[in-house]
Image (cartoon, helix red, strand yellow):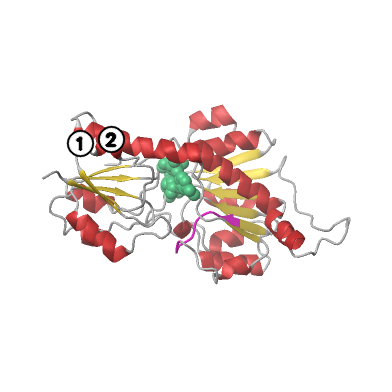
Amino acid sequence: MKPILWITFYLPNDLAERLKPYVTIKMWQDDIHDMPQEEIEAAVLEADYLWTIVPNQITAAVLNRTTKLKMITNLAVGFNNIDVEAAKEKGIIVTNTPDVLSETTADLAFALLMTSARRMLDNAKQLYQGKWLGWQVFGMTGTDVHHKTLGIIGMGAIGELVAKRASGFDMNVLYHNRSRKEEAEERYGVTYRSKNDLLAEADFIIVLTPLTKETHHLIDREALAMMKRTAHIINVARGGVVDEEALYDALVNGEIAGAASDVFVEEPVSTNHPLLSLPNFTPMPHIGSATVETRQAMVQRNLDAWEAYFTNQSIPYRVI
Ligand code: NAP
């Protein structure tokens, strides 16, 4: 009997066809809803190999109970949904999909910045609701993006490409990482700042760190209070990086001007989420990498890792 590869999401068009000589494929068959957590855990225990997406939580508790799981590929660059320390202890290989989604995600980050600055969602809603009644000098006005200061927190692969886009808008770009990146400073003309200085100086902030213990609530109440009252914050990282309750309060109390987020602590986000009631907040349903070209390239990265494993080659895109 061939070993089992469990794909814990729906992968259409028989894209895993080329793995069939090596494994028996089991796959979640619902194209609309994510696999429930209890079923994921049963699949993890049954699997020799596992192919996951970000909503699938692969916890230490379940990894510690596995007896035959050897490798996990995650269809994302972020891998906060997998307890990689627990995987490492069990000798389980984990791979992700770096680089191929960076341009596409940078596009979305910049689109959200523009949407928030120009109040595009709120203005479109007013149009749909028949509230566009005439041309007013200061009606429906937002704020300029060009020549403003952008602060990027998490100047990694995606952050650098956001900086590149910002240079076309003549923006002054600041960044914060745990370590300075002199190469990026030279290439994109960006300037390093401490987190607090960046928060105080930027007109727009884009958050692009991984979600880790250290970055959980990196943008908390205190951080939001340091921002300009005219500033906007855009989260394209992970829901937990920004304290959603503190963000809601900052937006309602006018401590900051606007925010947009592609990611939420609970996904899919409830339509009753308080942030969704605010005119100065733009939500997106986690579509950072969601273009046909990029999703195909991400699948390809995972397939390449599987083929390398099954043909005893060196495995690319390893996280551990
Ligand atoms: P990356 O190349 O690894 O860059 C991450 C950056 O974050 C690094 O420059 C890192 O620099 C910085 N960082 C890490 N911990 C930090 C901390 N505590 N404080 C400040 N900076 C910190 O990753 P990437 O490919 O750009 O992706 C970044 C994240 O975006 C992913 O992990 C993922 O969660 C998210 N993402 C979301 C979507 C989406 O659909 N919305 C799509 C792709 C990625 P130092 O190590 O020097 O601190």
What crowding class fits label 1: few (fewer than 14 Cα within 10 Å), some (14-19), or many (20 or more)?
few
In the picture, measured across the screen, residue 242 lies left or right of residue 249, that is left
How far apart marks 2 and 1 lie (CA) works out to: 7 Å
User: In the figure, is residue 68 to the left or right of 158?
Assistant: left
Can see residue 119?
Answer: yes
Q: Check disc 2 and report its element: helix, strand or loop.
A: helix
Q: Which residues are magenta?
A: 260-267
Q: Is residue 259 magenta?
A: no
Q: Residues within 10 Å of mark 2 (few under 14, many from 20)?
A: few
Relative height, residue 312 to residue 295 (above, below): above
Q: Is residue 188 above or below residue 253?
A: above
Q: Residue 125, image x and y in percent?
A: 71, 61
Q: State the residue position of label 1.
A: 21
| 22 on left or right of 209 | left
Rendered location of residue 246, percent (x, y): 55, 67
Secondary element at image label 1: loop
Q: Quadrant of residue 66?
A: bottom left
Q: Position of residue 157 (x, y in %)?
A: 47, 37
